[in-house]
């Protein structure tokens, strides 16, 4: 399966934080063709590719969950009220199409008041989540047979192609990271590596990196490479706040990253002429690394960020070349660990 096909297929499956099981089992099937894959009790997908005896354990992690909504109430007028799961910008969800995953999928829209009937003051104000509702067309008595409070809701936007090797859609944060991880595993399939590898599709990153934390405690890795997305350069954002699309994955440096892992990733990218850039993350990384770093006595972490535009919207954009370069860097780094000794990284 190509990297593009991998991302497109993942985008067809609902995987809101805490409800990633469908994607986890799908990913386990794909990764299971190249490694020994399973899912755990929290919903993580873990694929192991065994290395040499007494070799370093390396955990490569990209999160599986997406942001979404949850039904909270069915109103007398048949509208469905909802709450956010993860960091959803309320400005982005007005006049969008959604699917409520109830007893059967129910199509709906988040409506908006016509501008003709909206006052000047209302035009200036931001509409709160509590004032929004989903219109399915069903009356309450019919809808209550299909939808219950607690049902998840996803946005109806699958992944499609733009020009110049770019993809757009919902949840590319972090299906792009999963695709990079899969690409790394494909590159490694014909090589004998010393490192004992664990490829983790983590659950519930968007609500607190819970899956990565439990996976790290179970695996107890020596090194972890976390693949996520970073803010790509877009109009209105300063250069120092962003990374560039088409320039490869960004190698993060900062408190959440082990300095030698950072140095080695950078050196290996240069040696192999792999496009890359540097991202400064002085405090928390905002990724699974924040929990993995402090798990099970401490883990040597590295963070790779794939440039992504319009984060946490339904029109996120990534460059396929960046995804592949990220996967290649991970594979090259793993092959560099043939003679690794634990005390080298301290």
Image: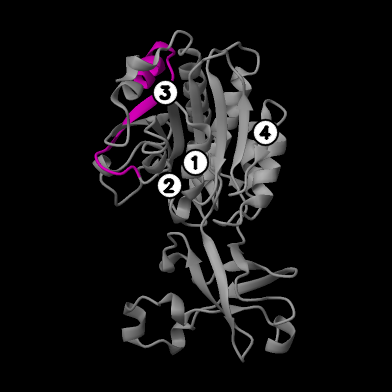
Secondary structure under badge 4? Answer: strand
Residue 307 placement (x, y as % from top left): 42, 39
Residue 86 placement (x, y as % from top left): 46, 59
Of circles 1 and 4, the one toward us is 4
Q: Which residues are magenta?
A: 264-285
Q: Check the picture and name the quadrant holding the N terminus.
A: top right
Q: Residue reaching furthest top?
A: 339
Secondary structure under badge 3? Answer: loop
Residue bearing mark 2? 309
Choose the circle earlier in sequence order: 3 or 4: 4
In this rendering, position of residue 94 left or right of residue 148? left
Choose the circle earlier in sequence order: 3 or 2: 3
Q: CA distance from mark 3 to mark 2?
A: 19 Å
Q: Is residue 192 visible?
A: yes
Crowdedness near tag 4: few (<14), some (14–19) or many (≥20) residues, C-alpha within 10 Å: many
Residue bearing mark 3? 275
Of circles 3 and 4, the one toward us is 4
Tell me which residue sits at (44%, 62%) in the image: 88
Magenta-drawn stretch contains 280 = yes
Choose the circle earlier in sequence order: 3 or 1: 3
Vertical placement of 239 versus 181: above or below? below
Choose the circle earlier in sequence order: 1 or 4: 4
Choose the circle earlier in sequence order: 2 or 1: 2
Residue 249 placement (x, y as % from top left): 42, 31
Residue bearing mark 4? 37
Residue bearing mark 1? 318
* Viewer-proximal residue among 66 and 273: 66
């Amino acid at each position: 399966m190509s990297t593009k096909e991998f991302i497109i297929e993942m985008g067809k499956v609902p995987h809101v934080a805490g409800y990633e099981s469908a994607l986890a089992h799908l990913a386990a099937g794909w990764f299971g063709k190249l490694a020994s894959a399973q899912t755990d009790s929290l919903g993580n997908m873990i694929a192991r590719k065994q290395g040499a005896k007494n070799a370093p354990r390396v955990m490569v992690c990209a999160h599986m969950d997406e942001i979404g909504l949850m039904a909270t109430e069915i109103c007398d007028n048949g509208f469905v009220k909802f709450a956010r799961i993860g960091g959803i910008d309320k400005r982005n969800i007005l006049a969008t199409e959604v699917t409520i995953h109830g007893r059967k999928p129910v199509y709906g829209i988040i409506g908006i008041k016509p501008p003709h009937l909206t006052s000047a003051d209302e035009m200036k104000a931001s509409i709160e989540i509590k004032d929004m509702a989903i219109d399915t067309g069903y009356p309450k008595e019919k809808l209550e047979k299909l939808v219950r409070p607690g049902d998840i809701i996803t946005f109806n936007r699958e992944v499609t192609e733009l020009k110049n090797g770019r993809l757009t859609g919902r949840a590319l944060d972090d299906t792009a990271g999963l695709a990079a991880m899969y690409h790394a595993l494909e590159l490694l399939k014909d090589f004998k590596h010393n490192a004992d590898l664990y490829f983790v599709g983590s659950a519930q990153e968007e609500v607190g990196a819970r899956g990565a934390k439990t996976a790290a405690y179970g695996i107890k890795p020596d090194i972890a490479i976390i693949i996520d997305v970073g803010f790509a350069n877009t109009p209105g954002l300063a250069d120092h706040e962003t990374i560039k699309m088409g320039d490869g994955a960004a190698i993060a440096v900062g408190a959440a990253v082990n300095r030698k892992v950072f140095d080695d990733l950078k050196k290996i990218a240069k040696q192999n002429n792999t496009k890359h850039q540097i991202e400064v993350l002085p405090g928390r990384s905002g990724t699974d690394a924040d929990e993995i770093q402090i798990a099970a006595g401490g883990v040597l972490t590295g963070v790779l960020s794939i440039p992504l535009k319009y984060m946490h919207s339904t029109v996120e954009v990534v460059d396929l070349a960046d995804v592949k370069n990220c996967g290649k860097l991970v594979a090259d780094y793993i092959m560099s660990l043939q003679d690794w000794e634990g005390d080298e990284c301290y």
